[in-house]
Image (tube, rainbow, N blue to C red):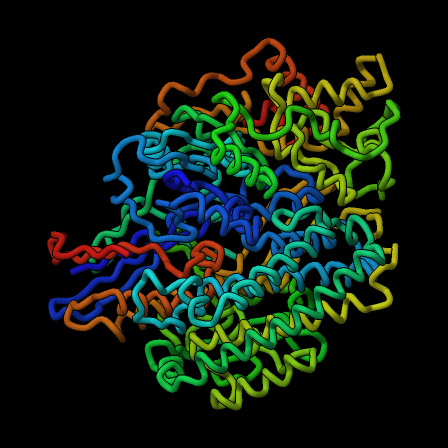
Amino acid sequence: MRITIDPVTRLEGHAKIEIFLDDAGEVENAYFQVPELRGFEQFCQGRPAEEMPLITPRICGVCPGAHHMASAKATDGVFGVEPPPAGKKLRELFYAAHFIHSHIAHFFALAAPDFLPGPDADPAERNILGLVAKVGPEIGGEVIKHRAYAQKIQAMLGGKATHPACGVPGGMSKPLSEEERSQIEEMARSCVEFARQALRIFDQVVLGNPAYVDMIRSDPYTMRTYYMGLVDEAGRVNFYDGKVRVVDPDGREFATFAPAGYLDHIAERVEPWSYLKFPYLKKVGWKGYVDGRDNGLYRVAPLARLNAAQGMATPLAQAEYERFYDVLGGKPVHHTLANHWARLIELLYAAERLLELATDPEITSPQVRVIPERVVGEGVGVVEAPRGTLFHHYRTDERGRITGVNLIVATVNNHAAICMSVKKAAQGVIHGGKVDQGILNRVEMAFRAYDPCFGCATHTLPGQMPMEVTIRDSRGHVLERIWR
Amino acid sequence: MAEKLRFAFWWAASCGGCDVAVLDIHEKILDVAKLADIYLWPVAMDFKYRDLEALPDGFLDVAFFNGAVRNSEQEHMARLLRRKAKTLVAFGSCACFGGIPSLANLFDREEILDWVYRGTYSTENPAGILPQPSFAAPEGELTLPRFFSGAFRLEDFVPVDYFLPGCPPTPEWILRAVEAIASGQLPPRGAVLALDKTVCDTCPRQKSDKKVKEFRRHHEIIPDPERCLLEQGLICMGPATRGGCGALCPGANMPCRGCYGPTREVVDQGAKMLSAVASILDSDDEEEIRLALGRIEDPVGTFWRFGMAASLLGGRAFDAGSAAPAGSRSPVGATATATSAAAGVETASASGSSPVAGGGKR
């Protein structure tokens, strides 16, 4: 018997889940497939490197800011330049705003409806409107307002929030005016308060409900893996810059490396049944779709970032970080659904960091850019995208024209883990061939926690992933079909 | 109030930015929800594919289609939505002109697969495995869709009523389009819902009709924020690009890259840009012009950044394994002007030893 979920939703297209049941109706195996490719790694060849920050945001219109920044950093390398301090701070300010947009959209539009009204609610109510009906319309207004602030700040710097144009080799295309700075400061203060409010809502709705805490801790949503994230010089979470730190399933440091050294640590595997590749830790090796210390499978995104780091760089977020591990029983936390809480802690960090940068005396300096004077011919740019570590690697000819591009996109890092989470959740909730709406949603929740690009917030506004489940017998005959 | 309108939103080969653009009308999204019932929006609602098939033909008032068409499922949806909707809107630059995904039309599909799955630096694939349309897993067959040889426009498959360009379209124009639909004040079919002026016409930068001796790459200078970028020697697509965006990129002190496509009178955006570039050069000497054009690093990938599928250069044949388009794929730009201009680019890129020289077909 097989269950086909097609389309789940999209990653530059769709994703598809195939669940195979044995004769007893228990889950035998599950495949998570990505059926589309556009080929950026190929068609960027021949383009001048400085154009890459303008081209690569089109990989994803939901996290264009992440590609823009990773690309700008990679071109810094290609041309052997380092942005001046104000240019670097301005990039980070832009990027903090990007995180605020993305994390707000994901939590409120996508994740929260699983907890309020709840995982087994009528699918017609299990969406942001159903959430707003429970928490009140003023919260809905605050969600829209603060996401709009975040978009506005990015547009001030980049011309537009979706597909910005401000990141150039050597810095930023224009400085920030005092008038703009003061507007940003005001919006940032409001975002800090909003993030605290979001955490209070999470406290009330999720942590205040023992059934949800049990679900977060339950086995179908728990996997012991390695974790990866960018950290600053003090080992704290940083979205824009730093070194990549990897911890093992016991939380011990496994590796810390500069972005340029990523090829020593990460390899990607190709499977004939998906257009998406499967990265793994090279020094541990690939052992299949199993968790534990012996397999090089690792995870990225909010929970992984918190696990891979030693703290947060802003005071309010640090306090929340400590509470997170107190409540969930110490580091590392292996509960996939804890990503939602981690995401809100990061939202608070992004808002605090935005405010810090907006009030930095250097932020309005006109020195935001240096002009390159040479071509080094190679650059690696790494940032933390909202959905995890993002690698852009370019090689060029002597005139800075692209000869090779390698991209490891945030969600791709999680690909093997998502496959496993889906299988594990399916094994945990599907028994005797019985499938209903609530069970389907619990399978979905396993990968929704990763905020995968193919199911990210804006792709599923009312919290509803499109799904078709077909149950077939072993000869492929359709026994039952469920729509939602 | 009259009966509510019936809308559908659909995405094909796109990045999701067009859907984010719809969200970026912020609180006005609630007005749209009052105005229309949305029957399909995979970004936001249940995906009820067969429910859509079950609707009577012409049931939907408007279908908004974003993304290029680059596989058979997307072609199927284009035809289905055309049948179900009274009005079909090509939403965003990918649906209108192919967009950035159609830069892939410069390469063969096999080249793309080989690099992505075998050549990229972090890939370890000693057996040379490629994703397969059909794979026999131990538990049963797993399938993947087949892809066309390139990315194509919506109008290459079905007649399109309106074009809403932009990468992405601005919230302002999305709202204008919705208001026009709501009030029944739509322009004649076939219209482009944007200005019929160029980005240059709307750009606040000062122009002094100054000629340039040579072109620079945008990372090589810090441009004056007040003066025309083209006159400072940067390739800015403003003269060849339709306005309506508000000249946002020049506002960020960066050159336009042409995402709104050509204006009405222009058949081929890249050809138009080539003539704009030639006319701003401070030379009548053919050899000097040729050398100056040769300094433009990637004319093909710049002049046709968003319009490869709409150009002669991107007119790749479909591969044998995929359906041919329905005959509406006329050789756009096949005028004497565009042909000679495209040939001019070949010359230019050849002298610049561009890796995509030769009309882009490497």
Left or right: A455 as drawn, with respect to A124 = right
Q: Position of residue A146 (x, y in %)?
A: 62, 63
Q: Residue at x 57, y 53 (%)?
A: B26
Residue A322 visible in this rendered orientation of the protein: yes
Q: Residue at x 45, y 49 (%)?
A: B33
For the residue pair B93 and A187, the one nearer the viewer reads as A187
Left or right: A228 as drawn, with respect to B33 = right
Figure check: A98 above or below A229: above
Q: Residue at x 76, y 24 (%)?
A: B293
Q: Residue at x 29, y 45 (%)?
A: B49
Q: Position of residue B264 (x, y in %)?
A: 60, 20
For the residue pair A413 and A15, the one nearer the viewer reads as A15
Q: Position of residue A302 (x, y in %)?
A: 54, 71
- The answer to which image quadrant residue A31 occupies is bottom left
**Where's the N terminus of chain B, which quadrant?**
top left
Left or right: A33 as drawn, with respect to A310 = left
Residue A293 visible in this rendered orientation of the protein: no
Q: Position of residue B152 (x, y in %)?
A: 46, 30
For the residue pair B55 and B339, the one nearer the viewer reads as B55
**Where's the C terminus of chain B, which quadrant?**
top right
Figure check: B293 above or below A462: above
For the residue pair A440 and B315, the one nearer the viewer reads as A440
Figure check: B353 above or below A202: above
